[in-house]
Amino acid sequence: MSVTVREASADQAEFLADLIARGLLIETGVPGVYGHNAAFEDVREALAARLTAEAGLRGAQRLRFPPLLPRRQLESSGYLSSFPHLAGTVYAFDGDERQAREQAECAAAHGDWSEHQEMTALALMPAACYPVYPAIAAQGPLPEGGTFVDAGGAWVFRHEPSHDPARRQIFHQHELVRIGEPEGVLEWRDEWAQRGLDVLRALGLDAELDVANDPFFGRRGRMLQANQRSERLKLELLVQIAGPEPTACASFNHHREHFGGTYGIELADGGVAHTACLGFGHERIVLALLHTHGLDPDRWPDAVHAELGADAAR
Ligand code: ZN
């Protein structure tokens, strides 16, 4: 299979080269898959702690899931009709000794050994909120007022290889999820869009809130995109990293009854729950900080360090 790798602008290519030269990113040989050094991780972990503290202060329950999704959940979520081009599935070997030898020989020559691989019950996590919905549904009807979950900064996979350092195939998406009555959920989404904007601006980032759409697949996808925009279902926080376009560093999504209906999440009064989720891209925010304040975090303004180290204040 030949996969198209998205080209980077000159700006993005230069920023990537600088990040690698500094050791902040560690190359793996595959575009969009990088390791991080301690300086990068210190900032990312401080950011994660800050977001978790903000959520905890407002009553979020912390749930954590591994970066693998049961394939059945991916299948029932609708992801494969909306984003077939981004999904990743886990395959494994299930053959005899002769087939194992053939596979090993083919693999040693870097050939195509996919004929020896079978689908497993697992897929790579496409969005960190996906395991939250069935988990909450399994708890039975929601309490009055619904629930708020902090799913943390979980690894998620998107198959979109690119030379832009801000477009990863695997990255940490910090998801906060609200499940409850329709009005409360929409209010929460809008309130957190403003809070997200405040947090990024307090870190010295020139962030803007805008209406956005997901990269839905195909012709039907263009219709879904237009609908998503006209109904303001998706908002994004945009920050200029390496140009030309600003990069979405967080998104705020209103799913209405999609997940509530799919997984049977019941309100206290028996109705179908509405849901909304927020996803903060850890790596993109760290890159925005590095691009704005310089590649040496030790030399960032004191105010930025104070914000990163601060407990949730607002
Ligand atoms: Zn989500």
Image: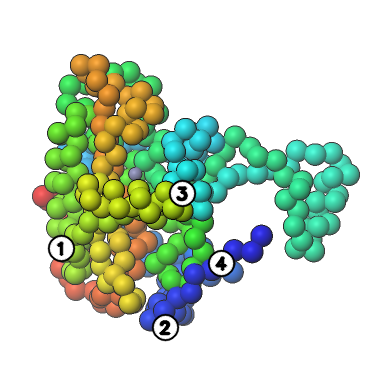
Residue 209 located left or right of residue 133: left
* Residue 185 in view, yes or no: yes
Which quadrant holds residue 260?
Answer: top left
| Image location of residue 30, percent across then percent down | 57, 66
Q: Residue visible at 20% across and 16% down?
A: 269
How many angstroms separate mark 3 from mark 2 (CA)? 28 Å
Relative to 90, 189 lies left or right: left
Residue with the mark numbered 3? 83
- Give the spatial CA distance, label 2 vs label 1: 29 Å
- For the point 26% across and 75% down, the residue is 292
Label 3 residue near ligand 1, CB within 8 Å: no
Q: Residue at coordinates 26% horizontally, 36% vertically from top-left?
A: 256
- Number of numbered discs visible in the structure rendering: 4
Give the distance between the C-alpha atoms of the residues marked 4 and 2, in whole angstroms. 18 Å
Spatial CA distance of label 3 from label 4 is: 16 Å
- The image position of residue 305, as x and y in percent, is 21, 65
Quarter of the image holding residue 215? Answer: bottom left
Residue carrying label 4: 4
Q: Residues within 10 Å of mark 2 (few under 14, many from 20)?
A: few
Confirm or reject: label 4 Cβ below 8 Å from ligand 1: no
Q: Which residue is mark 1?
A: 202
Callout 1: helix, strand or loop? helix
Residue nearest the viewer, comparing 210 with 36: 210
Give coordinates of residue 158: x percent, y percent: 47, 54
For the residues carrying marks 2 and 1, which lies nearer the camera in this image? 2
Question: Disc 3 vs disc 2: Cβ atoms closer than 8 Å?
Answer: no
